[in-house]
Image (cartoon, rainbow, N blue to C red):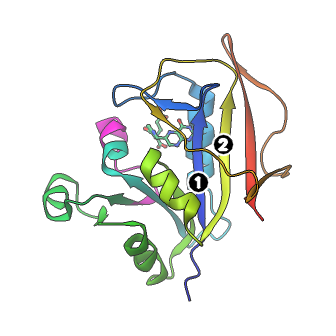
């Protein structure tokens, strides 16, 4: 029996866009700091968190920031042998979500697991029995996007108010957003 719970984290705009031309459509410094804090924070100082991402999301992270520091980086690709040669030592390369979960289950030093995109990985994670919560930043503006966050099935996921994230409207420049959490029923 797998003990790994998948938490999704994403920022999406009004049209549910999450990316354009292999990058983020916006530059939101505090929102990115929230991503870093949420994916890095542990309650047991002896442990670390894991981040699971698709190969294109790996490519979208600036070279100076990858692998994402203080987190176990797991990259999903159908081309494991090729991608393994392209990423630094220590990065885990696996063909799918189930293999990523098996890897995490096999070790005792991982506290929580964050699925950080993109579209197809979010969709697979949302449909996976191990899916727990979705941490979605809802940006109150439309951006030109070519990749989108998959539909959240509101029958299976409901909006919750958790103490762990600020509930009030956030603002950076002329952009407003909210930190939302959806929990699986
Ligand atoms: N979730 C949320 N809430 N916001 C995001 O921007 C986001 N982005 C991704 C996945 N989930 C998200 C995927 N894209 C970095 C860059 C792109 C990216 C994810 C992470 C990155 O470079 N992160 C660094 C900090 C960079 C900085 O401070 O500018 C890190 O250490 O986390």
**Residue beneath the point at 62% across and 32% down:** 31
Residues in magenta, as a range: 59-73
Q: Is residue 69 visible?
A: no
Left or right of 110 on screen, residue 7: right
Position of residue 10 measured from the top left corner of the image (x, y, whole percent): 57, 42
Q: Is residue 126 visible?
A: yes
Q: Nearer the viewer, residue 49 or 121?
A: 121
Which SS class for mark 1?
Answer: strand
Instruction: Quickly name the residue at label 1.
Output: 8
> Label 1 neighbourhood size at 10 Å, few (<14), some (14-19), many (20+)?
many
Q: Is mark 2 within 8 Å of ligand 1?
A: yes
Does 120 appear in magenta? no
> Label 2 neighbourhood size at 10 Å, few (<14), some (14-19), many (20+)?
some
Instruction: Quickly name the residue at label 2.
Output: 136
Q: Quadrant of residue 12?
A: top right
Answer yes or no: do the residues labelled 1 and 2 have beta carbons within 8 Å?
A: yes
**Residue beneath the point at 37% across and 74% down:** 99
Q: Judge whether 65 appears above or below 2 on screen.
A: above
Left or right of 95 on screen, residue 1: right
Q: Judge whether 97 appears above or below 154 on screen.
A: below
Q: Nearer the viewer, residue 158 or 75?
A: 158
Position of residue 176 measured from the top left corner of the image (x, y, whole percent): 72, 20
């Amino acid at each position: 029996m797998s003990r790994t719970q998948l938490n999704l984290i994403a920022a999406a705009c009004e049209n549910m866009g999450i990316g354009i031309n292999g990058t983020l459509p916006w530059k939101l410094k505090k929102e990115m700091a929230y991503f870093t804090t949420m994916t890095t924070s542990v309650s047991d100082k002896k442990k670390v968190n894991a981040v699971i991402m698709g190969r294109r999301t790996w490519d979208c992270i600036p070279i100076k920031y990858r692998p994402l520091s203080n987190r176990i980086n797991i990259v999903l690709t159908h081309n494991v042998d090729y991608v393994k040669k392209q990423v630094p030592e220590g990065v885990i390369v696996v063909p799918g979500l189930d293999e990523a979960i098996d890897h995490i289950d096999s070790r005792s030093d991982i506290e929580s697991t964050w699925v950080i995109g993109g579209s197809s990985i979010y969709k697979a994670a949302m449909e996976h029995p191990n899916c727990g919560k979705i941490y979605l930043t809802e940006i109150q503006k439309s951006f030109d996007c070519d990749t989108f966050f998959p539909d959240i099935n509101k029958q299976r996921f409901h909006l919750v108010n958790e103490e762990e994230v600020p509930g009030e409207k956030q603002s950076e420049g002329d952009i407003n957003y909210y930190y939302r959490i959806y929990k699986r029923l």
